[in-house]
Amino acid sequence: MKHISILIPKGAILGSLEGSRQLLTQVNDFFRQKGEQPFFDVQLVGHTRETMVSGSHFTVHADAVLDDVKKTDLIIIPALDGDLPEAIKNNQDFIPWIIRHYKNGAEVASLCVGAFLLASTGLLNGKKCATHWMATNHFRKMFPEVNLVTEKIITDEQGLYSSGGAFSYLNLILYLIEKYTGRDMAILSAKVFAIEIDRTNQSSFTIFNGQKEHEDEPVKKAQEFIENNFQEKITVDQLASMLAIGRRNLERRFKKATSNSVVEYMQRVKIEVAKKNFETSRENVNEVMYKVGYTDSKAFRVTFKKITGLSPIQYRSKYNRMHELS
């Protein structure tokens, strides 16, 4: 039997905590229905017996406190609510406990922005990690040593797992169920809970707002110029000349401030405008392409799919209600 410790941090989001428990304990019921022994021993583990979660609207009762757990196979860190640095500060006691059990052979999975607590252990340094796309800029700023992969729904590296935004944690739990119990059990769980299995990319959900949480004013001016003139063919040399900065210096500073090259930023701005057009209008792919400043249809389609994970037609079919009703 595999022992699973679902942590109850202060300010945890109840949904990811209870959803994980429900899925894993349901797997035990599936095994019982087949006349077999339960596969998981699932415990809710807190710093104290009672912990307030989800903005103090709920209190969760722990099956065990940290000192009760002598050995565990998998630690699950649910998503955290509110100010994340404050949440980490409020849950410092979990950090050495997670490190100790990982070194003793436990695997660790973070759900959504639970990645912030996992990253605080230092265990993710030099490794891949996913989190909610809305928190990516904040995460990179706090944990520059972690290889944040914004498009991924699931990462799996050296016994450390993470999931992308919000309810995509369900895909990570399914992934772990498959890893531990087999494909058939994962498919059964997906069907019973009506979860789309094998989702690996969250790019189509991402809304690009530009990374302006930095203090480099010339870079901010470059970003604003790109956003206000996305239909035009802007060059890096043009921006450098406008800002009276050397091209290589601008590229270095831009990448450091935004985590994108200048060209990548231009592409993301154009594609974000294109996405909004596909969501709200009846314009065809070529009309949208020209509107955002592309003239090469192949380049537009390749770039669109690279950023969103979907072709322009797939994206419009998925998100445009007028298209759905037509």
Image (cartoon, rainbow, N blue to C red):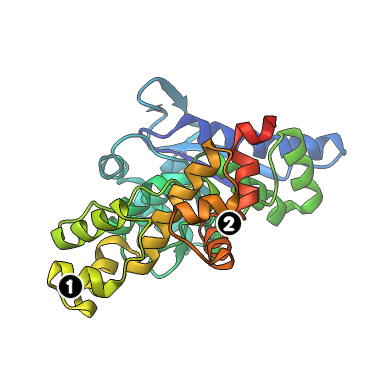
The CA distance from mark 1 to mark 2 is 34 Å
Judging by the rendered image, the residue that carries numbered circle 1 is 241
Residue 171 to residue 106: above or below: above
Does residue 215 appear left or right of residue 59 in this picture?
left
Q: Position of residue 198 (x, y in %)?
A: 68, 52
Q: Quadrant of residue 53?
A: top left
Q: Is residue 191 visible?
A: yes
Does residue 321 appear left or right of residue 14 in this picture?
right
Residue 226 to residue 61: above or below: below
Identify the residue at image location x=38%, y=32%.
48
Foreground: disc 1 or disc 2 = 1
- The front one of 311 and 25 is 311
The number of numbered badges drawn on the structure is 2
Mark 2, residues whose alpha carbon is within 10 Å: few (<14), some, or many (≥20)? some
Badge 2 amino acid: Gly
| Quadrant housing the C terminus | top right
Judging by the rendered image, the residue that carries numbered circle 2 is 309
Badge 1 amino acid: Ser
Q: Is residue 202 visible?
A: no
- The front one of 148 and 232 is 232
Q: Residue furthest top?
A: 57
